[in-house]
Amino acid sequence: MNTIPVEHSLLLAAMLFVIGLIGVLSRRNVILMLMSVEIMLNAAGMAFVVAGSRWVQPDGQVMFIFILSMAAAEVSVGLALILQMFHINKSIDTKSLGKLHD
Amino acid sequence: MIDYLWLVPALPFLGFLVLTFFGKKLTKNAISFVGAGSVGLAALLTIIIGIQFLLSPPDGNFFNQKLWTWMNVGGMSPSIAFHLDALSLIFIFVITFVGFLIHVYSTEYMREDEGFARFLSFMNLFVGSMLVLILADNLALMYLGWEGVGLCSFLLIGFWYKEPANAAAARKAFIVTRVGDTAMALGLFLLIVNFNTLNIQDILHTAPTQWTAGNSTAVWIAFLLLGGAVGKSAQLPLQTWLPDAMAGPSPVSALIHAATMVTAGVYLIARNHVLFELAPSAMSAVAIIGAATLLMAGFAAIVQNDIKRVLAYSTISQIGYMFLALGVGAWSAGIFHFMIHAFFKALLFLGAGAVIHALHHEQNMFKMGGLRKELPIVFWTFLAGSAALAALPLISAGFYSKDAILWYAWSSNKGSLILWAAAFFGAFVTSIYTFRMVFLTFWGKMKTHVHIHLGNAMQIPLIVLAVLSLLGGFIETPHSLGHITIFSSFLNPVLPEVQLNHGGEFTEIILQILTALTGFLGIYLAWHFWYKKPAMVYNFKQTGLGTGLYKLWLSGWAFDWVYDTLFVKPFIKLSQINKDDIVDQLNIGLAGLVNWLHSVIKKTQNGNIRWYATGIAIGLVITLTIVLFL
């Protein structure tokens, strides 16, 4: 059975992470930013799974389940916040949050 | 009665307290009664003590009364104690007696002033402080009185403080005398270091055993004490405050700036004469300062327009004579001139005050004139005072006191021809400016009408002082005129006799005749220039030389200008440079740096969420770089 070399998998994880990061940095729509954060989380989760498979340990998959549940919690909180933000600002553009400074 | 000596300074202090605390509630009559009465009682007591002192002199010709120990620090314990001897007796007599007359005069002169009670309370405080200065048996207590009279001088020059010029004059007097006082304080410290006591009699007895003449410590001490005397007595180079001090009411000028306080320097030198005898260079400095001052002030007096400024410069000049006498070792002649000067200069100031009062605050002599008929008593008494100031021979007391100084300036072993010539020429100038003042004020056309006629409270002191100015001289006369020496033999136990070097009775008579003639010449010149042909003076004033001299002398030889450029302006410049406290800049700079950093970092908090995320990302990259590659 052909195994995928661990470097490749990690490279994929890194690429996913960077894609997510660029998404967070470049998007102004809060929902899309939240989605990008999810991508980054999944990239991290993937790195754990790859590492678990490399050393034949279950810890990697355990960590992924943690990340998954944390992501679910985070999204629920995040969506609630976005709803509040839309209520107050009638917009989900991050620029409308600018008045929070100072 | 001599046991009640402490009452002499205590009575004026009591008057001061009463007037200060109850002055607002008392009627004007009660204020006059307390103010003049306290000094009057002190004068009466002084006279009784004086008579007792003369009739039955105490052991050693002095009386010491210790009230309590002031403080006890480091083995030195100055006490509140009074020392009465011939010298201090003469001074307290003049202070209380002339002071009383001036207080009586003030009760009419200042009666309508809203600060009447305040005025008399300050005057009482002054008399009390002055008596402490004179009677003190140690220099620490003397310094207390010395500063007390300085304070009263400040308060009374600035009595009409609503006028900014008066307040400025008061400050000037205080600050300029402070220069001298600082020197005097240093002298006292030197004395403490050397003797571990400030008791005057102890020092005077110990000093000759410890030092020989010309010892450098003695010279230092004498010069530092001289500094204090020069400041208080308005001698060169600290004389600039006295002409401005005329901003105070006329009785203040008469009491403080003519009769008593300004002669405190003379007293200081006479009191510590042993120290000065141990320092011959300081003695010559006293004589030279006196001679230079009397000439300088005499010329300045010739061109003044304000009658009180003429008298101020004349006071500086007459104290110059006293310094000259002290400097040549003619101690009792200096003290004699002090006493006579107190009589006639107080008289002249009170007379000038009466004229100013009658003319409704007109001080310019060129706007007076013809007052001979309008104010006959003031005229005759003023004439008596002027005769004494100009030292008219035989009939005036000023002749006897000034003639003695002139004679000793020549004949003393410390005297010289130059000192005599300066004093002689000064006497000539004195008679010119004195009678210029008399002719301008009382002769000629009347230019301002008399508003107020004077009451007895103002006229009686004038008459008493006029009598003293004329007759007071007969207690001390030269060889050629009876050789009465009541005054100098009375002072002899305290002050040594003058050591004569050259000149006999014949020279003395020649010099007296010369002095008398120049006195008359001065009067003739004053009559000629300011009464007969005023155009001559006016024309001379228009020429370049005349204008220059006029401006130079009017400003008192431009000393104010010199001090302004040398001290005041550089000081103001420095203050302006240092306005923001250069040293503080370090602390302020540190705070500024922190503030600046804060403002820079504050910019990163801009509320833009992507900016924050970028920050996190950059941080991540940097951390990873450090972890992986370094």
Image (cartoon, rainbow, N blue to C red):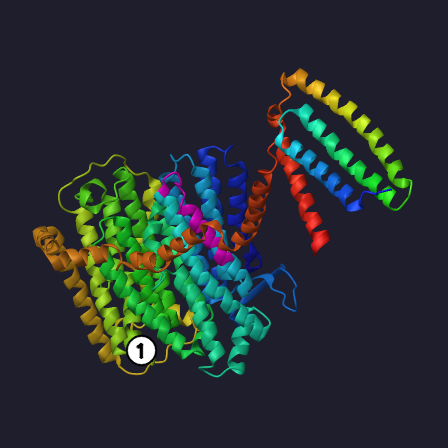
User: What residue appears at the point 49 percent right and 41 percent down from the top-left corner?
Assistant: B34
State the SS at label 1: loop
Magenta residues, start to end: B145-164
- For the N terminus of chain B, the image quarter is bottom right
**Residue B373 position by quadrant:** top left
B615 vs A13, nearest the viewer: A13
Q: Residue furthest front?
A: A1
Q: Residues within 10 Å of mark 1 (few under 14, many from 20)?
A: many
Amino acid at pointer 1:
Gly
- For the C terminus of chain B, the image quarter is bottom right
- Residue highlighted by disc 1: B415
B372 vs B472, nearest the viewer: B372
Q: Position of residue B406 (x, y in %)?
A: 27, 71
Chain ID, mark 1: B
Q: Main secondary structure of the magenta part?
A: helix
Image-based side of B124 in relation to A62, left or right: left
